[in-house]
Image (spheres, helix red, strand yellow):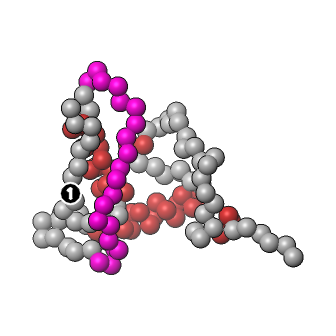
Amino acid sequence: MTKYKTTSLLVATNHTQELMGYALALTERLYRRGLPFTKAGVLLMELVSDNQMQINFFDTCDREEAARLLQAMDEINEQMGRGTLRYGAEGLKQGWQTRAEQRSPRWTTQWDELPIVKA
C-alpha cells in the first residue's frame, strides 16, 4: 500500500486555495476506509520566486484576482485578528493546536521577537 501521493502543478503558485485543492485531491486518493489516518504532511519541491513563474497556455486560474483575494484576506486578518477569515477546508473547530514550545526564535522575520539588549 502506498503511504504517499505526489502531483505536479501545471503552473507554480502561491495561492492558498489552489494549493489546498491539490492537497485535498491527493488526500482523497490516499485515504482508505477503515485504516487509521492520524496526520499528513505536505512537501513542496522546485520552489521558484513569484517573479520567475512561467505561465502556461492551459492555466485557467486568474492569478491577478487570486493575488487580490489573498491580499484582502491578509489585510482583514491583520486588522481584525488572526483567523478572522479562514478557508472552509480548515473546519470550524480544530481540536488541536500547533505545538511551538521548542520552536526557535524568529529573529530575522519577526520584529517582536528580536532580543532586547540593555547596556
Q: Quadrant of the N terminus?
A: top left
Q: Is residue 55 left or right of residue 18?
A: left
Image position of 74 with respect to 26: above or below: below
> From this viewpoint, which residue is outermost toward the right?
119
Q: Residues within 10 Å of mark 1 (few under 14, many from 20)?
A: few
**45 sits to left or right of 39:** left
**Residue in the image at 52% along x and 64% along y:** 75
- Residue 17 appears in the picture as rendered: no
Give the x, y percent position of residue 36.
35, 25
> Could you tell whether 65 is left or right of 82 in the image?
left
How many numbered discs sit on the rendered protein? 1
The magenta span reads 33-52
Can residue 49 be found in the magenta stretch? yes
Specify whether 23 is left or right of 88: left
Secondary structure mostly seen in magenta is loop
| Residue 18 visible in rendering | yes
Residue 14 image point, x, y percent: 35, 64
x then y, percent, for residue 117: 80, 72
The residue furthest top is: 34
Secondary structure of the residue carrying numbered label 1: loop
The percent position of residue 54, horizontal first and vertical second, equals 22, 74
Question: Which residue is labeled 1 in the image?
Answer: 8
Residue 52 versus residue 75: which sits nearer the camera? 52
Amino acid type for the residue under numbered disc 1 = Ser
Residue positioned 22% across, 59% down in the render: 9
